[in-house]
Amino acid sequence: FGLFALQHRGQESAGIATTNGTRIVYHKGMGLVSEVFTGETLARLKNPAALGHVRYSTTGLTTLTNAQPVVVDYNRGKVAVAHNGNLTNSPELRARYETRGSIFQSTADSEIIVHILAEPSKHSERENYIRCLNEIEGAFSLLFLTPKEIIAARDPYGLRPLSLGELEGAYIFASETCAFDLIGAKFVRDVEPGEI
């Protein structure tokens, strides 16, 4: 229902990734939320933690490979990423990672995020997310879903919106509070610029 409320933000594609605490399952497709998700699909996705995305392309082609969330298995496990915004240094970052042997599956700037996360590092998992956020530039709000947690982050200038809400004792995030209204969640506050 939160994605229905945000449908005006993008009509090209929609996706949801969820976790039961040990694995991530996801579904994404081209079209409106009502076209991408059936009752059967939603039943398969039912889990305690989730993130969703509706896309309107500002970079990259209108194709299924660019639909979000971006979900990958990498050296630290599985992660799903939902990104709102534009990464202004993505061409330079993409060129750097392609030179090192990275193989990109999409034309969207969002994919660079998972390549940065997957770069071998001695940092802790949490420090690795901070390192990733320090590498990217531009306007962004991000949600990361791992089997164990959801991490929300907003660009240092606060150019893209990200709000924190509460529903039945759980925290939720959305790019607009209208997603909270539709599901009966309480708005708590905006995520501050640069806050993780």
Image (tube, helix red, strand yellow):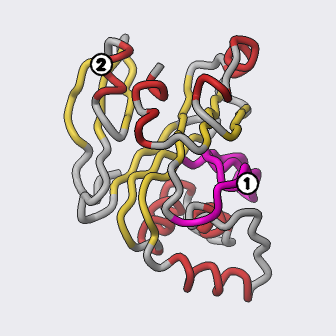
Q: Is residue 123 magenta?
A: no
Of callouts 2 and 1, which one flags the residue occurring earlier in the amino acid sequence?
Answer: 1
Is residue 183 in view from this perspective? yes
**Which of the 4 image quarters holds residue 190?**
top left
Front residue of this view, candidates 125 and 193: 193
Is residue 117 in view from this perspective? no
Q: Secondary structure at mark 2?
A: helix
**Which of the 4 image quarters holds residue 172?**
top left
Residue 170 is marked as none
Amino acid residing under circle 2 = Asp
Give how far across and how far down residue 120 sits, in percent: 68, 71
Instruction: Please tell me which residue is depicted at 76% across the width and 63% down the height of the picture.
Output: 105
Give how far across and how far down residue 109 sits, in percent: 56, 67
The reply to whether the C-beta atoms of the residues labelled 2 and 1 are less than 8 Å apart is: no
Mark 1 neighbour density, 10 Å: few (under 14) some (14–19) many (20 or more): some
Q: Is residue 78 magenta?
A: yes
The alpha-carbon separation of the residues under discs 2 and 1 comes to: 31 Å
Front residue of this view, candidates 53 and 31: 31
Give how far across and how far down residue 192 sits, in percent: 22, 50
Mark 2 neighbour density, 10 Å: few (under 14) some (14–19) many (20 or more): some
Instruction: Please tell me which residue is depicted at 32% across the width and 12% down the height of the picture.
Output: 184
Q: In the image, is 164 to the left or to the right of 183?
A: left
Give how far across and how far down residue 158 sits, in percent: 25, 58
Front residue of this view, candidates 64 and 163: 64
Where does the magenta region start and end?
59-82
What residue would you read off at disc 2?
A: 181
When the figure is inspected, residue 23 is found, relative to residue 128, above or below; the finding is above
When the figure is inspected, residue 126 is found, relative to residue 111, above or below; the finding is above
Instruction: Please tell me which residue is depicted at 37% across the width and 70% down the height of the picture.
Output: 138
Front residue of this view, candidates 83 and 22: 83
Residue 65 is marked as 1
Q: In the image, is 49 to the left or to the right of 167?
A: right
